[in-house]
Amino acid sequence: MSRKIATVALLVRDYDAALAWYTGKLGFEVIEDTALGGGKRWVVVAPPDGTGARLLLAEADGPEQEARIGDQTGGRVFLFLETDDFARDHGAMTAAGVRFLEEPRHEPYGTVAVFEDLYGNKWDLIELAP
């Protein structure tokens, strides 16, 4: 049996703003952008190497979902963006305007820094130790 987490839904305020941020700031690629009718779309993005989970950018539907935009995990780090070159990606993301909440730190498990996406969700940029 083979199973994996393939896609993670991320609540967003606006499809196009989220697409612009994830492609422009993180360098993600658009995997799919399909109209579903009624203003809804199936919008999937992922890092360009094609490995790991993808993000489904899910536009919030109603006040309850809108209230959770940017805080799907109660303020904890939500997603982990692994890299093979922390310095390269940290530099590129900083130059693109990504807001890091801390300076890079070296932990036993690797080099890491927390950043926020356009809605305030917390992410780790992490290069795992060998």
Image (spheres, helix red, strand yellow):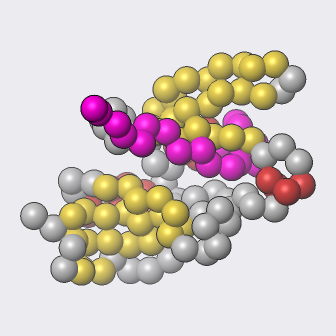
Residue under the point 71% across and 27% down: 41
Is 15 magenta? The answer is yes
- Can residue 87 be seen here? yes
On the picture, is 95 further left or further right than 72?
left
In the figure, 7 relative to 77: above or below?
above
In the figure, 115 relative to 61: above or below?
below
Over which residues does the magenta segment extend?
Answer: 1-18
Q: Using the image as rendered, state which of residue 28 and residue 37 is in the foreground.
A: 37
The count of marks equals: 0
Quarter of the image that includes the N terminus: top left
On the picture, is 52 further left or further right than 74?
left
Q: Quadrant of residue 34?
A: top right
In the figure, 57 relative to 122: above or below?
above
Q: Residue furthest right?
A: 63
Q: Position of residue 126 (x, y in %)?
A: 31, 64
Q: Using the image as rendered, state which of residue 47 and residue 51 is in the foreground.
A: 51
Residue under the point 21% across and 73% down: 109
Is 127 magenta? The answer is no
Residue under the point 50% across and 77% down: 101
Q: Position of residue 31 (x, y in %)?
A: 49, 26
- Can residue 100 be seen here? no
Q: Position of residue 68 (x, y in %)?
A: 75, 61
Quarter of the image that includes the C terminus: bottom left
On the picture, is 111 further left or further right than 11?
left
In the figure, 103 relative to 91: above or below?
below
Q: Residue furthest left?
A: 130
Q: Position of residue 107 (x, y in %)?
A: 24, 80
Q: Residue furthest front?
A: 1
